[in-house]
Amino acid sequence: MWSCNICVQEVDDPTIRRFLRARDFDISQASAMLLKYLKWRRTFVPNGFISASEVPNQSAQNKMFLQGSDKKGRPIAVVLGNRHFQDGLKEFKRFVVYGLDKTCARIPPGQEKFIAIGDLEGWGYSNSDIRGYLGALSILQDCYPERLGKLFIVHAPLVFISVWKIVYPFIDNKTKKKIVFVENKMLKSTLLEEIDESQLPEIYGGQLPLVPI
């Protein structure tokens, strides 16, 4: 049984099932996770959504895009890492929620996940933001469980490895299995395994222009 009726009242059955899957159907752990999420959502997103006016600096960096769907109907988000700069952790966290909510709103009936392409071309230490990365990871794993279908990390430079080694231990095992580092020479062919060319962003050899969220 869930710890309190509020869980059933505030969320739908698919959400409950996602939290259960995230905790391997351990009802006690899933219940605690869901209650923590509900408390966070009421506090961090009191209006029920984040508006563009709440993330002006992050939006101005023009770093997240949402267009097309993969072969399973999952919406495709693209994040350009070289456009991210530290500009206030709280606003960045709001931007993460803003982006995830917009992405999840594009998920069609019968599907629960999205896929993402994290593009690190041109990324350097000026873009490094450990606290921001860990904050985004925590929100994704704790508040949007079982939403990420796959994350392709492309054009990763060698300098990123030192940051990745810091972040990696904080990634849960379920999420680790969804992350794929793609070699440059295999980029288009790897993405085409999951995405039709008509739905693939132009910057990866496809036909769709990037559309800012």
Image (spheres, rainbow, N blue to C red):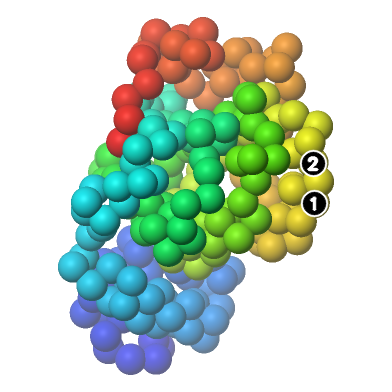
When the figure is inspected, residue 104 is found, relative to residue 170, above or below; the finding is: above
| Left or right of 82 in this view: 109 | left
CA distance for labels 2 and 1:
6 Å
The residue located at (22%, 51%) in the rendering is: 53
Residue 185 is left or right of residue 55, and the answer is right
Q: Which mark is residue 161?
A: 2
5, 176: nearer the viewer: 176
Q: Amino acid at mark 1?
A: Lys
The one nearer the camera, 156 or 23, is 156
Say whether marks 2 and 1 touch (CB < 8 Å).
yes
Q: Amino acid at mark 2?
A: Ile
Q: Can residue 177 be seen here?
A: yes
User: Residue at image x 80%, y 51%?
Assistant: 165
Q: Residue at x 27, y 88 (%)?
A: 5
| Relative depth, front residue between 10 and 16 | 10
Q: Position of residue 213 (x, y in %)?
A: 31, 36
Residue at 44% from the left image edge and 17% from the top image edge: 201
Figure quadrant of residue 31: bottom left
Disc 2 crowd rating (10 Å Cα; few below 14, some 14-19, many 20+) is: few
Q: Which residue is mark 1?
A: 165
